[in-house]
């Protein structure tokens, strides 16, 4: 008598469950790597709006709170919402120029928030349409976009190291960043520390900065300990056509960037993303965009630097990101915790950012190795697209004389690369343009380990 074959259930890499302590440790590492990016936008916006310090602090806390909610939705998911990937969300820089333009034209915070709400609704409705273009993202396209993502993030690390000083980085900042980078690299060679190399590097770098007098903890105890974000603090949102059109363009660009991040994190994790999963991920971000203004925050987006962190640490579980999301929500409700994390010197973050952002570019180069450069004109697709990434980096005013909406798209290296790679691939590679999409590309990635339970 023969027995029926037994099928061993398997889990996807991103569904691995870790002990609670480790999950929160790795989640805290995610927060440290993206914290500077989250708080930068509300700081810029609050300063431009000439808000008093307590209201600027409220904007920062709101950004952390909304980023936590968005990350939790993206990583854990609900029916039709969330990619269920280790993808961290934070406030997008892409909307800054539009929001500053709205302020300059006389519109206040209510006009900004009104435009975000409407644009978010439009983006939510467009999400399924964007998910259907997956077949236009073969390895030559996804690899180019991911590489462009890493390249476009490197100036962020440089800005952290210089402290945004137009005169360049000081010797002390260079030394602090270099020391942090060295600690991270050493930790990657130690098996017990490899998965928390970024966290250890940032902590050790901060300790050194404190010893050298470059980290100031004197203001940690100033201000409230607990504060829940007050809905519509600046009043009811106002809806103006011009602001809505401009913000909708931003959201369309954001959808492209989110989709690029979905492809990137799927590549790093070694899992597949289909049309349904892409749509769920885009819808989650757009729902978070709609809700953000309620809590006085701006549009969130997937953070590419955290994709780099996944690549460096090899910790692929989405539950670590969910744990980090809970910490973000706490930071948003406990300004005291936020002030402690804010004491990490920007030069320390910059040193860690070199590895984080460089790892994203490296993942893109790895993907390009699976592209067919022998047939077609793929080399020209890559060359042109990466050149478009470099233009606004090398010359920030390169698109200063084009219409605002066009400059907004081309000025984003990721968006310009995505548009260029997709369109040139279709134009130059013809009938081979959609062969070897992301699903085929994943064949080179080892299968998930069998579930033992």
Image (cartoon, rainbow, N blue to C red):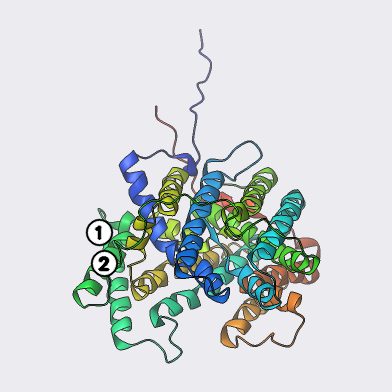
Secondary structure at numbered mark 2:
helix
Residue denoted by label 1: 190
Q: Are marks 2 and 1 in contact (CB under 8 Å)?
A: yes
Residue 143 on image: x %, y %: 60, 65
Specify the quadrant that holds the C terminus. Answer: top left
> Quick check: 163 left or right of 72?
left
Residue at image coords 30%, 62%? 188
Q: Residue furthest left?
A: 211
Residue at image coords 28%, 84%? 172
Secondary structure at numbered mark 1:
loop
Residue 381 on image: x %, y %: 69, 73
Front residue of 96/150: it is: 96
Q: What's the CA distance linking mark 2 and mark 1? A: 7 Å
- Compared to residue 431, the image places residue 405 above or below, namely below
Dot 2, crowdedness within 10 Å: few (<14), some or many (≥20)?
A: some
Is residue 85 in view? no
Residue denoted by label 2: 186
Is residue 403 in view? yes
Front residue of 404/226: it is: 226
């Amino acid at each position: 008598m023969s027995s029926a074959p037994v099928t061993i259930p398997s889990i996807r890499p991103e569904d691995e469950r870790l002990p609670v302590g480790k999950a929160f440790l790795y989640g805290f590492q995610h927060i440290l790597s993206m914290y500077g990016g989250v708080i930068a936008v509300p700081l810029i916006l609050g300063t431009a709006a000439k808000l008093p310090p307590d209201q600027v602090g409220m904007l920062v806390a709101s950004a952390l709170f909304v980023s936590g909610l968005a990350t939790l939705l993206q990583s854990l998911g609900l029916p039709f919402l969330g990619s269920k990937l280790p993808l961290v969300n934070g406030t997008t820089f892409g909307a800054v120029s539009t929001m500053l333009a709205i302020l300059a034209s006389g519109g206040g915070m209510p006009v900004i928030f009104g435009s975000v709400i409407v644009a978010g609704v439009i983006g939510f409705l467009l999400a399924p349409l964007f998910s259907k273009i997956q077949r236009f993202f073969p390895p030559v396209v996804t690899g180019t976009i991911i590489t462009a993502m890493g390249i476009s993030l490197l100036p962020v690390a440089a800005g952290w190291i210089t402290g945004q000083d137009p005169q360049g980085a000081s010797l002390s900042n260079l030394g602090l960043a270099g020391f942090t980078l060295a600690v991270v690299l050493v930790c990657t060679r130690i098996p017990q520390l490899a998965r928390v190399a970024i966290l250890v590097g940032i902590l050790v770098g901060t300790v050194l900065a404190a010893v050298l007098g470059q980290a100031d903890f004197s203001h940690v105890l100033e201000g409230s300990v607990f504060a829940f974000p007050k809905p519509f603090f600046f009043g009811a949102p106002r809806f103006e056509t011009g602001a809505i059109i401009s913000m909708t363009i931003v959201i369309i660009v954001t959808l492209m960037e989110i989709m690029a991040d979905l492809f990137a994190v799927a590549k790093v994790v070694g899992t597949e993303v289909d049309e349904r999963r892409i749509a769920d991920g885009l819808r989650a971000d757009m729902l978070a965009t709609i809700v953000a203004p309620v809590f006085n925050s701006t549009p969130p987006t997937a953070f590419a630097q955290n994709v780099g962190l996944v690549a460096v640490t090899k910790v692929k579980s989405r539950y670590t990101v969910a744990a980090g999301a809970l910490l973000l929500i706490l930071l948003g409700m406990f300004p005291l915790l936020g002030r402690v994390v804010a004491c990490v010197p920007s030069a320390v973050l910059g040193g860690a950012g070199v590895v984080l952002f460089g790892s994203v570019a490296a993942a893109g180069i790895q993907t390009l190795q699976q592209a067919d450069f022998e047939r077609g004109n793929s080399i020209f697709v890559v060359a042109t697209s990466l050149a478009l990434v470099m233009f606004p980096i090398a010359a920030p005013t390169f698109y200063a004389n084009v219409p605002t909406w066009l400059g907004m798209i081309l000025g984003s290296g990721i968006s310009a690369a995505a548009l260029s790679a997709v369109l040139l691939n279709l134009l130059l590679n013809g009938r081979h343009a959609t062969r070897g999409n992301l699903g085929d590309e994943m064949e080179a990635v080892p299968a998930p380990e069998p579930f033992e339970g």
